[in-house]
């Protein structure tokens, strides 16, 4: 077996290029190297001008997501060996504006994330004298959805987001759902006004790829469908009891 | 809170979901017999009188009404989304909604009329 | 063309291909699953035609049965059956999982949520087949 592999890396210089092109680099193929190690080898040894984001190298910071052979992937936890003998094509995450090379602009996602109020919302004057008791069952109901690391692989995998940039998208809705399910939270009504709109949950057509690519098994697709059930229940409630408190 | 801003999509989504179960449970065996086994002669088809008697039974009428109505709305909702996303007709969303859900309503009316007069 | 300010990054904005569903097998499978709806609509209309023929008398119904025997109709119905099976399987794998999670509030194995639906499907198929054959 060859001890090197070809990485075809997307290059885009906003000052001179109209669109990205791919440049090939030959990097060592070592059994313990991740795709990110290959990129770092290029940056350190072959071409220092290559731009990409990374930080923790252990799949928790969520900054090294890229398209690897067309699939949204966390490059720090994906072995180069998986793609032997190559070549491997590494590009910026789909559906986001490309700032340079492999770096994308995440402003749109961050704005949407803030819009769904992903924090514990209290309607009362909540000044707990001691810690808030939560049973293991109450924790389990939302725990899975709280594991999101905001890597935005789900946005790159979602054709609906690609087609309709207004779509709030998988991770933001999953996080809104995570707080709805939290027994400490009282913000479900506020979030429904944001999320139960066409460009919210109703834009989702259950392609399911967000859940397939999620490195933390958050299953955003499940969260969105559950959210649809909740929104439907609330809709019928407000339809049958228009002035009722719900 | 201004619930008025919220989408009315729960109605069609609810009909889509119920229709999805009807289609998943019942349509395969329908098309298997009436579309394939009976016409091809592999299985002997019951005659006209027997089929008519089956359809005229009140429970059959009720079943067919539920099956066809929910399946019409299931198909309408999914066809609308398929045409806007897969066939890239997003810009025609209003027209598509009108055609698809309108078609389902017409289908429901024809279903009621046929089941009442058969 | 938008005018950029001096320090505004000139980002490249990718566009989705019109044939995006051909890019990956998962997307194509999704497109096929959704296309089952066209066959659901077709078969509902066909059933209405059958009901109309039944109501119009034995002669008309014989005419309808003759139409159903033509090879083109058999091919269309065979394709419809394939799409219906795709719909049933994808539906039973997805929807009960969501419903169970909503009701129980905790994850359940996929088998546990899907299995009852496959049993109901099997039961409904057998009972309806017996009605169609005139046994019941």
Image (tube, coloured by chain):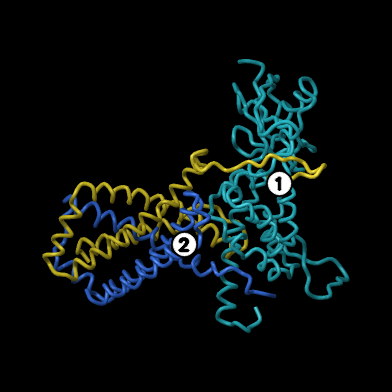
Chain colours: A cyan, B blue, C yellow
- What is the spatial separation of the Cα atoms under label 2 and label 1, in whole angstroms? 31 Å
Instruction: Determine the chain carrying the residue at label 1.
Output: C
Q: Quadrant of residue A32?
A: top right
Query: Which residue position holds label 1?
Result: C2
Q: Point out residue C104 in the picture as x, y percentages from the top left corner.
A: 59, 64
Up-down relation of residue A79 to residue C96 (above or below): above
Q: Quadrant of residue A212?
A: top right
User: What secondary structure is found at the residue carrying circle 2?
Assistant: helix
Q: Which residue, as the protein is rendered here, is positioned at the far top? A: A2
Q: Residue at x 29, y 63 (%)?
A: C127
Q: How dense is the environment of label 1, judged by Cα within 10 Å: few (below 14), some, or many (20 and up)?
A: few
User: What secondary structure is found at the residue carrying circle 1?
Assistant: loop
Q: Which mark is residue B95?
A: 2
Q: Would you say A240 lies left or right of C65 here?
A: right
Most foreground residue, A185 or A51: A51
Q: Would you say B10 lies left or right of A38 here?
A: left
Q: Which mark is residue C110?
A: none
Q: How dense is the environment of label 2, judged by Cα within 10 Å: few (below 14), some, or many (20 and up)?
A: few
Q: Would you say C51 lies left or right of A127 here?
A: left
Instruction: Determine the chain carrying the residue at label 2.
Output: B
Q: Residue at x 49, y 41 (%)?
A: C19
Q: Point out residue C117 in the picture as x, y percentages from the top left corner.
A: 43, 58
Q: Point out residue A97 in the picture as x, y percentages from the top left corner.
A: 69, 43
Q: Residue at x 77, y 64 (%)?
A: A120
């Amino acid at each position: 077996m060859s001890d090197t592999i070809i990485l075809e890396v997307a290059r885009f210089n906003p000052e001179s290029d109209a669109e990205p092109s791919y440049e090939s680099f030959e990097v060592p193929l070592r059994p313990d190297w991740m795709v990110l190690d290959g990129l770092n080898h290029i940056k350190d040894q072959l071409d220092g001008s290559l731009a990409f984001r990374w930080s923790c190298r252990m799949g928790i910071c969520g900054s090294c997501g890229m398209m690897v052979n067309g699939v949204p992937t966390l490059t720090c936890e994906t072995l180069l060996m998986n793609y032997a003998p190559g070549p491997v094509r590494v590009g910026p995450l789909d559906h986001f504006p490309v700032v340079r090379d492999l770096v994308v602009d995440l402003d749109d996602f961050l704005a949407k994330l803030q819009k769904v109020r992903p924090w514990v919302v209290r309607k009362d004057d909540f000044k707990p004298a001691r810690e808030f008791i939560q049973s293991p069952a109450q924790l389990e109901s939302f725990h899975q959805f709280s594991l999101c690391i905001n890597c935005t692989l789900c946005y790159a995998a979602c054709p609906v987001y690609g087609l309709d940039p207004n779509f709030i998208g998988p991770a933001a809705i999953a996080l809104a759902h995570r707080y709805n399910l939290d027994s400490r939270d009282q913000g479900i009504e506020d979030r429904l006004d944001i999320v139960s709109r066409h460009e919210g949950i109703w834009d989702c057509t259950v392609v399911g790829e967000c859940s397939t690519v999620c490195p933390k098994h958050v299953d955003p697709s499940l969260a969105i469908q559950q959210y649809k059930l909740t929104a439907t229940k609330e809709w019928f409630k407000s339809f049958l009891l228009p002035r009722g408190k719900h | 809170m201004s619930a008025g801003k919220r989408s009315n999509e729960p109605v069609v989504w609810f009909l889509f979901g119920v229709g999805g179960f009807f289609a998943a449970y019942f349509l395969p065996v329908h098309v298997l017999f009436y579309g394939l086994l009976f016409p091809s002669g592999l299985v002997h088809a019951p005659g006209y009188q027997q089929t008519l008697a089956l359809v005229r039974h009140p429970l059959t009428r009720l079943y067919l009404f539920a099956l066809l109505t929910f399946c019409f709305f299931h198909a309408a909702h999914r066809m609308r989304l398929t045409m806007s996303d897969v066939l890239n007709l997003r810009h025609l969303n209003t027209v598509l909604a009108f055609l698809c859900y309108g078609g389902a309503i017409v289908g429901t009316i024809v279903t009621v009329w046929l089941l009442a007069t058969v | 063309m938008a005018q950029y300010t001096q320090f505004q990054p000139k980002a490249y904005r990718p566009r989705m291909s019109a044939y995006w569903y051909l890019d990956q097998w998962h997307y194509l499978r999704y497109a096929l699953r959704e296309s089952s709806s066209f066959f659901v609509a077709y078969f509902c209309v066909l059933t209405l035609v059958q009901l109309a023929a039944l109501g119009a008398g034995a002669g008309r119904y014989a005419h309808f049965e003759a139409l159903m025997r033509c090879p083109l109709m058999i091919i269309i119905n065979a394709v419809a059956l394939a799409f219906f099976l795709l719909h049933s399987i994808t539906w039973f794998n997805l929807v009960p999982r969501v419903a169970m999670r909503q009701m129980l509030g905790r994850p359940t194995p996929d088998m546990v949520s899907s299995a009852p639906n496959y049993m109901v499907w099997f039961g409904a198929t057998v009972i309806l087949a017996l009605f169609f054959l005139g046994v019941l």
